[in-house]
Amino acid sequence: MNLTLLLAQLLNGLQYGVLLFLLAAGLTLVFGIMSFVNLAHGSLYMVGAYAAALAYGAGGSFTLAMLTAMAAALAVGLILETTVVSRLYRRDHLDHVLATFGLVMFFNEAVRIVWGPQPLFVQVPESLVGTVDLLGFGYPLYRFAIIVAGLVVAIGSYLLIHKTRVGMLIRAGAQNPQMVAALGIPIGLLNALLFGVGAMLAGVAGAMAGPVLSVQSGMGDAVLITTLVVIVIGGIGSVTGAFYAALIVGVVDTMGRVYLPLLLRQVADRSVADAAGPALASMSVYLLMALVLALRPQGLFPAHRT
Amino acid sequence: MMFRALWKAACGAALAAPLIAAQAANIGLVAPLSGPQAIVGQDQVDGFMLAVEQLGGKLGGQSTNVFKEDDQLRPEVGQQAVRKLIDKDKVDAIVGLSFSNVLMGSLPRIAESGVVAIATNAGPSPIAGAQCKPSVFSMAWQNDGAAEAMGKFVQDKGVKRVYLMAPNYQAGKDMLAGFKRFYKGEVVDEVYTQVNQLDYSAEIAQLQAARPDAVFVFYPGGMGINFVKQMSQSGLTGKLPLYSVFTVDGTTLPSLRDAAVGTLSGGMYDAALDTPENRRFVAAFEAKYKRTPSLYAATGYDAANLLDIALRKAGGDAKKLAAAVKASAAELKSVRGPFRFGKNNMPVQDYYAFETMRDGGKVATRVVGTPLKAHVDAYAAQCPLN
């Protein structure tokens, strides 16, 4: 097996994983601390992608587009938290699912009504066009940029959570929210802040995905499911867990897609392998999740809830 | 006030209904109008409605009611829509009928009712072959047509080693089979990806490593946008010729632009076709909807014009409509060029090769060949109709 190719595929997996982490970080905290199931997290990703695409199209600056996406996702996240989500914390998980599923449909339709069913056009920023030579193998520069940006955000969130007072409260909230509230911490404000930051990270993911993926109504739905898998594998409420799980899922999914069909061809008939390969590959991350749930139901890096 | 006005209107409509029914043409329009493929459905509706408008709101000289239904790209929803149109709205014809899976799901009810159905987005092989029906037509294509044309085009160019890619479902397999029916060179690899996959980085790395002479893909809608963008970002576009069907077309080009420059695609229509009918159609469509019509808009537009001729021929006799539709194709001035129905009611038409190129500051398409002329599909022989 070609080593350069393997390296390129590892980078692909890493890049996918980093994108998943940005989505999973917010989702896992909201789930872990407020015990709130937010299916509309994918819509916030879409909000980020649309805001960036529109700002980039209008202004021509990618930096400005990223900032717009962050601001838009943060604003929409905070509005959602105060108007809808905060009313539902005390309710049942099924109510959360029902309400946020409604939000998903609302956002998808709203986007379609305003900007139409046509996907938006987003370009790779001028400075990130081109490929990096990887021992004779061209790897897109923009994907490198995604990896770097994602790792920076990961380190930033690690510092925020482990080295600051707010981070301490977040960690405390993940383990025992009632106790945090009893100590006089304004848990409502903390929740809103957390939801907003999670939304902003999802917005960043959407904005970064824009030049690579098609920006259209419903773009957040598929990625949300994989994100849920990530937080289950990582351990609900654990950002560290989400980070490792996102990278694992990214690499497993990428490697599965490439090498499972090839492996199957060794053991089975060509036509059988062609049919079963992609089907099995699409199951690989779910199989991984099932395995984790069977062996470590609390996830790989649980938030030590007592 | 409001209620009184509504009540009056309702009474009026109820009284007038039997009178209108005697002279009005009722047409059902089924298309995916929500979800990721909504643009494909919207183009068919817009194309159809443009033609109705140009004909003064009438088809075959009769005032026309169009009932639009969203099938959400789900066979069971499409089936319900078709039942409603046939049983409740008592339509004379149903147009659109969405993707192959939705069309196949609705087929039993349509065939049983005898209502004329004109598909503007699909021509699945069963309907082209043994299950062909006298009242079911395709105004679009037999599904394999465009891929067969690309296969022939690539074969004629003398390309030696081709890499094939498609999503892992029936249409994906049909497209690659269609390509291979006319391409006789070496197939380096045949890769099936997950349906609605977002990221193709892994597959593109494999493709790059395999070093073929060209790649042929079928990635409709958002999948195509993702694939073509990502291939361009890998620096492959321009170095490795990309041939495709239903991937780079009027619906995806506005969001691809430069990423698609240099790619070649096969199909029976593109706004670039230079015929008087098409120039008129493109100008009218752009004036009304502020965007360039895709092949889906063209099939919708042609279907309305075909029905206009057919309804006139049938002279209000529902039983004669199917035969009239078939005969009308000879009189239709299709925007795609020569058109007629084969014995299986599938289109017999030309398939073109289009190149996406830069034209001044804009990205445009041009015709670079007509690999298949008056092409009859491979399944026609299995159809028992005459």
Image (tube, coloured by chain):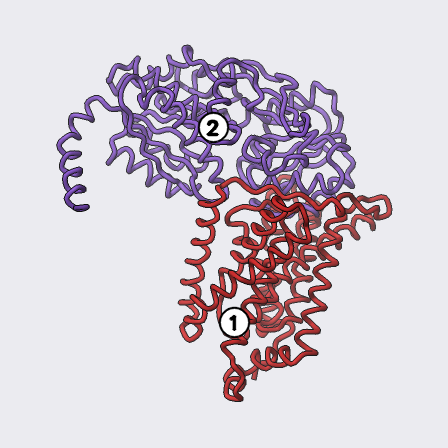
User: Which quarter of the picture shows residue B115?
Assistant: top left
Relative placement, left or right, of A228 versus B29 is right
Residue extending farthest to the bottom is A183
Q: Which residue is mark 2?
A: B297
Give the red chain's letter: A
Compared to residue A146, the image places residue A87 above or below, namely below
Q: Position of residue B55 (x, y in %)?
A: 35, 19
Q: Which residue is mark 1?
A: A192
Q: Position of residue A158 (x, y in %)?
A: 69, 72
Q: Residues within 10 Å of mark 2 (few under 14, many from 20)?
A: many
Q: Which residue does the image show at 53% across and 57% down from the upper left?
A: A42
User: Which quarter of the picture shows residue A305?
Assistant: bottom right
The amino acid type, in three-letter code, at marker 1 is Ala
Give the purple chain's letter: B
Relative placement, left or right, of B225 versus B262 is left
Q: Position of residue B334 (x, y in %)?
A: 46, 16
Q: Which residue does the image show at 73% across and 49% down from the upper left?
A: A142
Relative placement, left or right, of B261 versus B86 is right
Of B273 and B287, nearer the camera is B287
Q: Which numbered disc, 1 or 2, marks the residue closer to the eye?
A: 1
Compared to residue B187, the image places residue A218 above or below, namely below
